[in-house]
Structures are given as structure tokens and as C-alpha cells.
Amino acid sequence: MSGRPYLLSWRLEDRKVVVVGGGSIGTGKIETLLGTGARIVVVDPAPSRRVEELSREGMLFLRRRRARPTDMVAAALVVAATGDSAVNRRLRRWAKVAGAVVNAVDDKQNCDVTVPAAVHRGPATIAISTDGASPAASRFLREELAGAVDHAIPLLTAEVVGQAAEARGELRRTGHYRYDYPAWRDGFFKPAMDAVRSGHLKAVDDVKRRFVAEFDSAAQHRPGRVTLVGAGPGDPDLITVRGARSLACAAVVVYDRLVDQRTLALAPAAAERIPVGKGKGFGHTQDEINSLLIERALAGDDVVRLKGGDPFVFGRGGEEADALAAAGVGVDVVPGISSALSAPLLAGIPVTDRRHAASFTVVTGHRATQNHDGGDPWTTGASETMVVLMAATTADRVARRLRAGGRPGTEPVAFIHRAGSPLQEVEVTCLDEVERRGCPFPSPTVMVVGPVAAMARRSEGEVRWDTSTLMTSRL
Ligand SMILES: C[S@@+](CC[C@H](N)C(=O)[O-])C[C@H]1O[C@@H](n2cnc3c(N)ncnc32)[C@H](O)[C@@H]1O
């Protein structure tokens, strides 16, 4: 099997399921099949005592012998619990002829399907699959999750799910049913879960009645919201917990060029993903992005606007928030870890190492091409450590400005390209060299100027904390 698994929920009532192997593992599988209503046939010359007992109680049909091709006839599913890969392969051949699918226990290569570990709460089932890679891991995660589920989703959730099914049935009968998830979430599930959590189980029924009565008008008038989320520097582990939660609930994700695909994968598979990469000479204009966000939110979608780093650091997030608010759209903003902070750190540079710097300034490289009347960031506004974003094409001018502001040509400079991604690269040089040759990398690159830049590591394992020797030997 290759690719991502597609999880299905399979009804097996009155279908024939053949379990080959009634030992301890097969018996465990049989226990999970018992509640499904399947016609269970177990084939084993020496089954476990539990299988014998279930057979006596009429819960399954037992064939006390070795398996034969004819056992598979009319089967929907064959569970191969033999512990022997060669036997499983043979069973799979027979099953294929009979048109049945095979789950070979702990033998991924002989599986058509794997069976997730499941947490059942009333009619709700939470499945955990490792796609057959490690049944023990699935089981361990299920055990871990069961505790967490009981905390987050109390056992009485069954009542909520049951009432949801009733509400759906009533709306179907009157021709009003729609799969309008935001309306269900806000109008039914949230108030129903609140009622369960505060011990007012009976109130769930009131919530349902109100929801059914108001379903049409609530759904029609519910506008969506936009959440501006900072994705951090690239690695999906570096998004905030709140950012990841917002993404997990998004119906639409509008993302920019710096967002890593692995972070995008935190959104539901069914969420619509819209790239709006901006950069020199390509992509959408800011007005187009604003209009898209407004349009989708007013249509009722919950939109996540996912931006690299922090949405308010050189990200025009403030302008987007203003445009949305002006259009009457609700906006939330979730901070992210800006590359201004994370890129130096991920390259091993402490921007305010007290031996070298008491402050740092973050500035855009674009300012090197402009003249300023007020505080010039390269001279009067400069700190010991300068962190320059968007300097890939202007690094030579940045260096010239800093030299003109009185910094020595030997001042260390570090460039960090694609920080936080598997393609991160780091170069350390000095201001004179940058003035001559510019930035060694294309965008996205962060430039760090100042004594602390000499502490940069070019690779994961490299340790360069002793700056006293480094600054002279390398530059
Ligand atoms: C338009 S600004 C957006 C900054 C972003 N909002 C943040 O807080 O990181 C784009 C610049 O951020 C820097 N940048 C963003 N992500 C980066 C990364 N993963 N590695 C290096 N530089 C990055 C580069 O200097 C790039 O030109």
C-alpha cells in the first residue's frame, strides 16, 4: 500500500466476515467484530476457549479445521490472523478470487485494508490509524486518546449525537436539511455541549427544538469570520496552538508564498486552499486579496488567512484587518513567530547576547533604497544587532548604508535562507564582502548584522558559541 489512507466507516450487518486464526490475536479481532452484526465465520483447528464459548452461544460459526478457498465464498471481509505471512499471502489470493478484501493482522504487505484503533462514544467513533505501520502505536494512541476524549468530549456526548441525528431526521422530513456545518456547530453542537458540561442533559432537547425551528433563518444570516494566522517560519511545529486550532476549523484557507505545505496540511482535507502568493512581479494585488477575504466571509465561510511568520510584521496584516473591519467582517488575529526572531535563533544566533548586544533593530531591506527625513534606521536608529528582512536584492545597499553609518567593514553578517524548513542554509561573511557581492541567497532570506552574527551555525551539528576566536579567525 502507498499514498495516504482513506478512512471509511463500513456497515457489516448480515455480511459474511471470515476470521482465519482463532488464537489470542484473532480472538481480539472477533471481539471488535461482535457488535457489528456481521455473520462471523472462524476457521481454526484449535481455537481459543473464548471462541469455543462464542460458538456455543451462537455468536459465530466455527470451522475446526484449516482454511480452504471455499471458506471465502460470499465473504465481504477476510481477517487473516495467522501470524504467518506466507499463509496470509495464500489467503489473500483466495479472497481476491472470491471478491473479498483482506485485513492481515500486523502484516501490512498482505492487507487490502487496515483497521484503525477506535474510541467509541455512543454513535460517535474516533478512529486512529497508522496505516498498518504499527498496530501497537495505534492501540497506545487510542488508550491515550480515550482519557483525553473523556475530558474534552464527555461520555454523555452520546446524547448530543443522538439529538443531532433526530434533528437531521426532522429537517429532512420537512425538506429543510442542509449540511451547513457552521450553522450546526454554532446553533446546535456548541450550546448542546455546554448543556452537557453543566449537567443540564434535558436542555439538549430544548437546544434541538430551537435549532430545528430556527435552522433556515440562522443559516441564512450567519456571516463567516476571517482569522489572520501567523504560520511561523516554516516548520509546522512552530505555529502556535491557537493557530493550529483555527486552521483545523477552516472552511477556506487563503495562504501566501512563504507558507510551508506541511503547515497547510493542518487544515481539514476538505478545506478549500487558495494561494495568493505575492512577490516581485507576480501574484495577487493587496486589493484583490482583501476583496477575496471579504467575499468569502460574507458568503458565510470561516476563512483562515495564513501568513508566514507573524501577520503584523511586514505582512500587511494590519491593512487586511482594517479592510475586513470596514466591510463589516469579524476578524481575529493569531500571532506567529516572526522570521525576524526565529531565523537568527534557528541559525544559532542569540540576537541580544549580552557580551555583544543590548538591543536589536528589525528593518526592511527596502528602506536601503529610500531616503528618510526622520530617524534613519541605518545610523541614528541602529542597534548593535540589525535584523534585516527582505534584503535578498538590496543587501549590497544595506551594507553600504551601514558602512556609511560608521560600522567597520569587518563587522560580521549572517544570511539565513529558508529558516525553519528542511532547506535552511546559512552563510557568514562581513560587511565589506556584502557590499561587493550582495546576498548569497534568493528570497526568503534574513540578514543579521553585528558581532552576534559570527555565532551562526551553518549546519545542525555545528557549535559556534565561542565568538572571541571566531570573529578574528573567520573574517
Ligand atoms: C513580506 S516579509 C514577511 C515577514 C513575515 N511576516 C514574518 O514575520 O516573518 C518577507 C520576508 O520575511 C523574511 N522571511 C520570512 N520567512 C522566512 C524564512 N523562513 N526564512 C528566511 N527569511 C524569511 C524574508 O526576509 C522575506 O523576504
Image (cartoon, grey):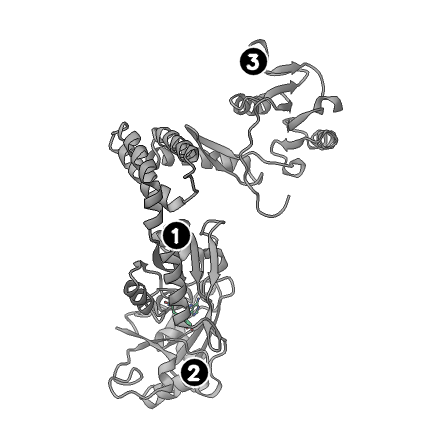
Residue matched to label 1: 244
Name the residue rendered at 69%, 30% in the picture: 88
Q: Is residue 274 left or right of residue 206?
A: right
N-terminal label among 3 and 1: 3
**Amino acid, disc 1:** Ala
**Residue neighbourhood size for the residue with mark 2, other residues' Cα within 10 Å, grouped as few (<14), some (14–19), many (≥20):** some
Q: Is residue 169 visible?
A: yes
Q: Residues within 10 Å of mark 3 (few under 14, many from 20)?
A: some
Compare residues 425 and 237 and report the one nearer the observer: 237
Q: CA distance from mark 2 to mark 1?
A: 34 Å
Give the residue pinned by disc 2.
394
Name the quadrant containing residue 336.
Answer: bottom left
Residue reaching furthest top? 56
Determine the residue located farthest toward the bottom in the rendered image: 404
Judged left or right of residue 254, residue 367 is left
Residue 377: x and y, percent? Answer: 29, 82
Q: Amino acid at mark 3?
A: Leu
Quarter of the displayed picture in which ligand 1 can be seen: bottom left
Quarter of the rendering occupied by the N terminus:
top right
Q: Secondary structure at mark 1?
A: helix
Would you say the residues marked 2 and 3 are in contact, meaning their CB atoms lie under 8 Å apart?
Answer: no
Q: Residue 164 at x, y = what percent?
A: 38, 33
Of mark 2 and mark 3, the one earlier in the sequence is: 3
SS type, badge 3: helix
Going from N to C along the chain, the mark reached first, 2 or 1, is 1
| Residue that badge 3 annotates | 54
**Kind of residue at badge 2:** Thr
Visible residue check, residue 408: no
Along the line of sight, the residue nearer the viewer: 458 or 182? 182
